[in-house]
Amino acid sequence: RTMMADAASRGDAKEAQQRESWDQLKKRIKASVNRANIGNIKDIIVELFGANLTSFTAVYAALIAVINTKLPLIGELMVTRLVLQFRRAFKRDDKGLCISSVMFLAHLSNQRVAHEVLAFQIVSLLLETPTDDSVEVVVAFTREVGAFLGSIVPRMLNYILGPIKVIKTKISKISKIELAQTLTK
């Protein structure tokens, strides 16, 4: 019982700390927006992007989509830079950067800033020679953009999910064999 009480108090403390950090972030954003005017908008945008908003890629993608309606070159530039960043991360086997790049590209695809063909190209590149990391990146990417792709081109989504299912089946068979070998020893 004391362990459960300790765990509950830690959970409450963690929740309170998270709530406090959210409140600070909210205050920082409101203060920046309230200070914004034509003369300092550039500085405010840089400040907002530096405000630990890394978990808000969907919000960034929506912002880019709105800007893209008036300035299409901005959307194109963003997609181009993200693709280049993904390529570099893929060549270096940097899974964290790969995931963040494809997640942002997924959100941009959902907002129709990036074309769905790009999403399929990314998946086919990652599944060309599947590794644990590349499959993990594909799964994360498909979670974000899968519903959109399923509504646009369901056949292509099945093309993506087919190899993932095969890989998952192989992994589960290998795990069962390893488990059986461990039990017989």
Image (spheres, rainbow, N blue to C red):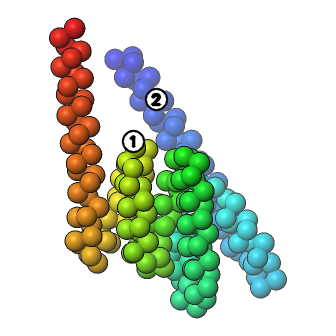
Residue on which the image places disc 1: 132
User: Alpha carbon of mark 1 to alpha carbon of mark 2: how far?
Assistant: 37 Å
x then y, percent, for residue 185: 22, 8
Residue 97 seen by the camera: no
Mark 1 or mark 2, which has the lower sequence index? 2
The secondary structure type at the circle numbered 2 is helix
Residue 9's tag is 2
Q: Are marks 1 and 2 in contact (CB under 8 Å)?
A: no
Which residue in the rendered view is the most extreme toward the right?
39
Q: Amino acid at mark 1?
A: Asp
Q: Residue 59 vs residue 120: left or right?
A: right
Q: Residue 123 vs residue 28: left or right?
A: left
Q: Is residue 64 above or below residue 137?
A: below
Residue 87 seen by the camera: yes
x then y, percent, for residue 95: 52, 47
Q: Residue at x 57, y 80 (%)?
A: 76
Q: Residue at x 58, y 91 (%)?
A: 70
Could you say which quadrant of the image residue 38 lies in? bottom right
Which residue in the rendered view is the most extreme toward the front?
129
x then y, percent, for residue 63: 55, 76
Q: Residue at x 23, y 72 (%)?
A: 154
Q: Amino acid at mark 2?
A: Ser
The secondary structure type at the circle numbered 1 is helix
Mark in the foreground, 1 or 2: 1
Total marks placed: 2
Which residue in the rendered view is the most extreme toward the bottom?
70
